[in-house]
């Protein structure tokens, strides 16, 4: 039979698998499971920043995460949402497989 012996299952190819501390943050923001698209990870991180009120009220593109587990996960006290490359670099250190 032309059985597919490939062991890579379709739903996992190109998926992002966050390491545990980041996974816990995504779950706190309402995510479930362990495999996400990049779009889903960014969506839930945005939700997390909102619900924890980590963004600066005056300069709303600045995120202050030094007193939050997000700061430990990203390794910074604060960051700007206007610097996507820095953001993705911090994110990539928290993924199980290098999808970048
Ligand atoms: C375009 C997008 C983005 C997406 C990726 C990147 Cl690498 C940069 C930027 N973005 C633009 N501003 C934000 C943002 C700013 C402050 C607080 C929360 C989110 C976001 C982020 C989203 C998001 O999914 N955004 C949906 C629309 N946002 C508009 C901003 N809105 C709030 C801005 C603060 C005041 C209240 C509304 C929330 C919905 N996810 C993120 C996750 C992180 Cl680790 C960092 C930032 C974001």
Image (tube, rainbow, N blue to C red):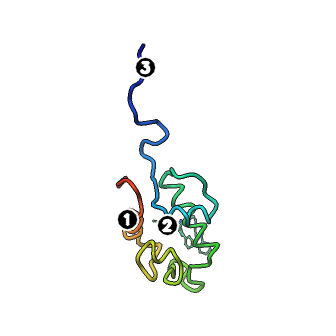
Which of the two labelled residues, at mark 1 and mark 3, occupies the earlier sequence position? 3
- What residue appears at the point 35 percent right and 54 percent down from the top-left corner? 98
At numbered mark 3, what does the secondary structure look like: helix, strand or loop?
loop
**Callout 1 crowding tier (Cα within 10 Å): few <14, some 14–19, many ≥20:** some
**Disc 1 versus disc 3: nearer the observer:** 3
Which of the two labelled residues, at mark 2 and mark 1, occupies the earlier sequence position? 2
- Position of 68 compared to 19: left or right? right
Q: Quadrant of the N terminus?
A: top left
Q: Position of residue 62 (x, y in %)?
A: 50, 80
* Residue at which label 3 appears: 3
* Residue at which label 2 appears: 21
Give the camera-side residue of 6 and 88: 6
- What residue appears at the point 42 percent right and 65 percent down from the top-left corner? 91
- What residue appears at the point 57 percent right and 72 percent down from the top-left corner? 49
Q: Position of residue 61 (x, y in %)?
A: 51, 77
Assign ligand 1 to one image quadrant.
bottom right
Q: Are marks 2 and 3 in contact (CB under 8 Å)?
A: no
Does the beta carbon at disc 2 come under 8 Å from ligand 1? no
Q: CA distance from mark 1 to mark 3?
A: 37 Å
Which corner quadrant of the image does residue 29 belong to? bottom right
At numbered mark 1, what does the secondary structure look like: helix, strand or loop?
loop
Which of the two labelled residues, at mark 2 and mark 3, occupies the earlier sequence position? 3
Q: Are marks 1 and 3 in contact (CB under 8 Å)?
A: no
- What residue appears at the point 55 percent right and 64 percent down from the top-left corner? 24
**Callout 3 crowding tier (Cα within 10 Å): few <14, some 14–19, many ≥20:** few
* Residue at which label 1 appears: 93
């Amino acid at each position: 039979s032309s059985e597919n012996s490939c062991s890579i299952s379709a739903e996992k190819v190109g998926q992002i698998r966050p390491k545990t501390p980041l996974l816990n943050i995504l779950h706190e923001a309402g995510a479930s499971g362990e495999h996400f698209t990049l779009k889903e990870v960014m969506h839930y991180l945005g939700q997390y920043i909102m619900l924890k009120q980590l963004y600066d009220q005056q300069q709303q593109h600045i995120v202050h995460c030094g007193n939050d587990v997000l700061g430990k996960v990203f390794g910074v006290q604060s960051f700007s949402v206007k610097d996507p490359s820095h953001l993705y670099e911090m994110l990539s250190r928290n993924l199980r497989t290098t999808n970048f």
